[in-house]
Amino acid sequence: MLKEIIQERKKQLADCEGKAVKEGGSQAKSLNFLDQILTILRQDGTYFPDKEISDHLYGIVAAGNDTSSLSISYTCLFLAMYPEHQAKVVAEIREVFPSPHTAVNQDTLRQLEYTEMVLKETLRLCPVVPFIGRNNAEPIELDGFQIPPWQHICFNFYSLHRRKDFWGPDPERFDPDRFRPEAVKERHPYAYLPFSGGFRNCIGNRYAMNSLKIMLVRILQEFKLDTSIRQADMRFRWAITAKLVGPHAVTLTKRNLY
């Protein structure tokens, strides 16, 4: 199935005279994921082979399934805990989607600014992948310690997202305003890494954010969220992903948004 999708899209791009762009180029950022990987030139001047393209697509589908479902579950839980934030998101959805038939596209999703802030704050407190590992190709110095090359280095995003020097005296507080543009500009760019960062960041980060917005829009258009769980009660068990211990226990009540 993926092979046919890749070949069909290649043909469409050729028909449109799609131009290859160099890795990291601004044009690539405007394309969807499949178009990017089909048109970006590698350092040796060649395109990615079909096998590598299909591997990346399988990665997007497989890795994005569990992580996205967990992320939307945590977002619904936080909105159920904090009805004032839920009300703001619902008001924004009503403004951007005045009718249940309003198109869901890049333009309307881009207008969901507060909704995106809520999603980002959820991913700060509940990074679905809380730990990652990297190997350093060259020697580095970290806090006065000399680290030789090719060491296994683990990063704890759960702790990073709770550092008081980055997030203030109350980092456990759920506060979407942390992601207002002026607040983001003042913060270290690597203080927030729900999708990792640098050259090895998550290849599905933009796809994930758009899919989360769409799911949240559809849920809140139909239902009001409530819960008896308090944030202080939340406990996690660590595996590849961070899963809540016990049920999410969100109650859905039919709402009449329109």
Image (cartoon, rainbow, N blue to C red):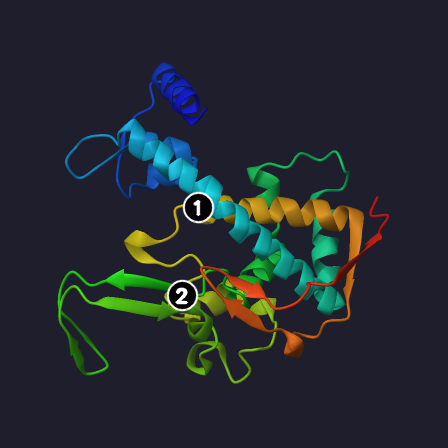
Cβ–Cβ below 8 Å for labels 1 and 2?
Answer: no
The quarter holding residue 120 reads bottom right
What's under tag 2, amino acid-wise? Answer: Phe
Q: Residue at x 72, y 61 (%)?
A: 86
Assess disc 2: are there few (<14), some (14-19) or many (≥20) residues with their C-alpha within 10 Å of its C-alpha.
Answer: some
Residue closer to the observer: 116 or 75: 75
The crowd level at tag 1 (other Cα within 10 Å; few <14, some 14-19, many 20+) is some
**In the rendering, at what x and y percent does residue 136 appear?**
20, 63
| Amino acid at circle 1 | Gly
- Looking at the rendering, which quadrant does residue 23 occupy? top left
Check disc 2 and report the residue beneath it.
Answer: 131
Residue occupying the point 24% across, 30% down: 47
Secondary structure at badge 2 equals strand
Left or right: 84 as drawn, with respect to 201: right
The quadrant the C terminus occupies is top right
Q: Residue 55 got which mark?
A: none
**Direction top: furthest residue:** 15
Earlier-in-chain disc, 1 versus 2: 2
User: Which residue corresponds to mark 1?
Assistant: 204
Q: Is residue 21 above or below residue 116?
A: above
At numbered mark 1, what does the secondary structure look like: helix, strand or loop?
loop
Residue 256: where, in percent of width, then height? 86, 48
What's the residue at 57%, 60% (across, down)? 117
The residue closer to the viewer here, 245 or 166, is: 245
Dot in front, 1 or 2: 2
Let me know if residue 31 appears in the view: no
